[in-house]
Image (tube, rainbow, N blue to C red):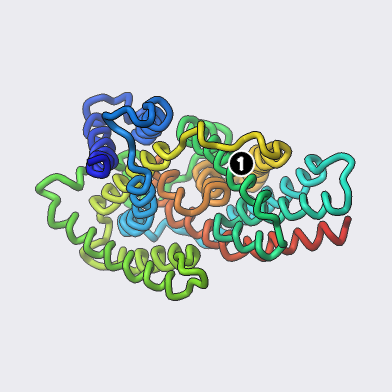
Amino acid sequence: MNSVITILYLLGIPLLVMRLAKRWSWIDKVSPMTVLYIVGLAVANLIPKGNGIFNVDLDINTLFSNLAVPLAIPLMLMGCDMNHWQIGKAFKVFLSGLVSVLIVTIIGFFIFQPADHTPEDYKGFAQVCAVATGIYTGGIPNMGAIKQAVGMPHQTYLYITSYDLIVTGLYLVFIIFFGKTVFRKLLPVQKKSSNSATSKTEETSVTDDAKVNPFDKSHLKATLIAIGITLVIAAISYGASLLTSKDGSPNMTVLILLLTTLAIAASFLPSMKQQQHSFDLGLYCVYVFCLAIATACNVRDMDIAGSLPILYYLGFIILGSLVLQIIFAKLLKIDGDSVMVCSVALINSPPFVPLAAALLNNKNIVVLGITIGLLGYMLGNYLGIGIFHLLLTIG
């Protein structure tokens, strides 16, 4: 019974919030994701366990959070206008974010390592620095690979995973509640195309997303086509990610890369060109994902007393790299939307890019964000292991 209620909760609450957003303009202003995040946190932290009425089935919750993103990525990409993507800009944004993370990671290593450190302490914190580099230039897959490569003790790894949940969770709260306002205020707003027709299309994509209801009967055929293509793309990508995996779990780099490539190819199909229904259906999946991850965030279950210097170090990386990236963006005249999606792709990983795009109401930023995240995945292991050996050489 609990499983059924959890499914209804995860699928029904986002749909309810989407409908209420049409009646109450304040929901659109603060973003439906903000509302869903608050609901999820309230359910996770305010409802006592074993209350006899409703407790979230965490296995079902995890399943939905894992499924939502592989479905959201192709759905949103198929609804994008690929003519707005610029390869040169993607590399410029990526490099500014990457350099910011690397500089702050190395500076933080010398600030937060123990004052009276032994050679073994130095090596231990160099391992932390290596894994942190992998996390915040790539993602969780890089984290596990670098842990094994540098020989990090399992207990230290557990501390990092716990602390990473805390600091990236807080950063996600900042992005959801204040991100769009802060980035667009500090940095230039994304320029419109000089072509009037293109400009009108882009303006619509920025301001009028989520206005089409993909569940309306009049859009049923288009919605079913989008779902069918998405399921095929997801199945192929997931199968390939398992075939290329060494430990039986999906190879995330292959999964995200194939989801992106096949979705971009599908976006050129006649039935999918400028398919707003597809994008809005992907947006619904993002809402489900947002509710699921917030519902899993029970602060009472987090270990925050183990090794606090590591917690401070990870927090310093996120805050410092954000400040430095904004400075670089000002110098390079990069717009706020691109910097925000780049920061989310590197700090929170590519699966959070659709969430950032939805917050910005800018669907054409999805390809940029996922490209940045994939580049991070590809380089993360090299950078983490390279910095580890560099620090050992210096020390």
Q: Is residue 87 left or right of residue 126?
A: left
Position of the N terminus, as image quadrant, is top left
Residue drawn at point x = 55 percent, y = 42 percent: 165
Crowding at label 1, few (<14), some or many (≥20) Cα neighbours within 10 Å?
A: many
Residue sticking out furthest to the left: 217
Note whether residue 361 is visible. Answer: no
Position of the C terminus, as image quadrant, is bottom right
At mark 1, the secondary structure is helix
**Considering depth in this image, is 389 or 192 the residue closer to the camera?**
389
Q: Position of residue 15 (x, y in %)?
A: 24, 38
Q: Is residue 83 left or right of residue 278?
A: right
Residue under pointer 1: 163
**Considering depth in this image, is 114 or 69 the residue closer to the camera?**
114
**Considering depth in this image, is 190 or 247 the residue closer to the camera?**
247
- The vertical placement of 61 against 72, above or below, is above
- Residue 78 is drawn in which quadrant? bottom left
Residue drawn at point x = 28 percent, y = 62 percent: 230
Note whether residue 94 is visible. Answer: yes
- Residue 131 is drawn in which quadrant? bottom right
Q: Is residue 360 left or right of residue 374?
A: left
Residue drawn at point x = 50 percent, y = 60 percent: 371
Q: Position of residue 183 (x, y in %)?
A: 54, 36
- Residue 270 is drawn in which quadrant? bottom left
Residue drawn at point x = 70 percent, y = 42 percent: 310
Q: How many marks?
A: 1
Residue flagged by tag 1: what amino acid is it? Tyr
Q: Position of residue 40 (x, y in %)?
A: 38, 33
Q: Position of residue 42 (x, y in %)?
A: 39, 27
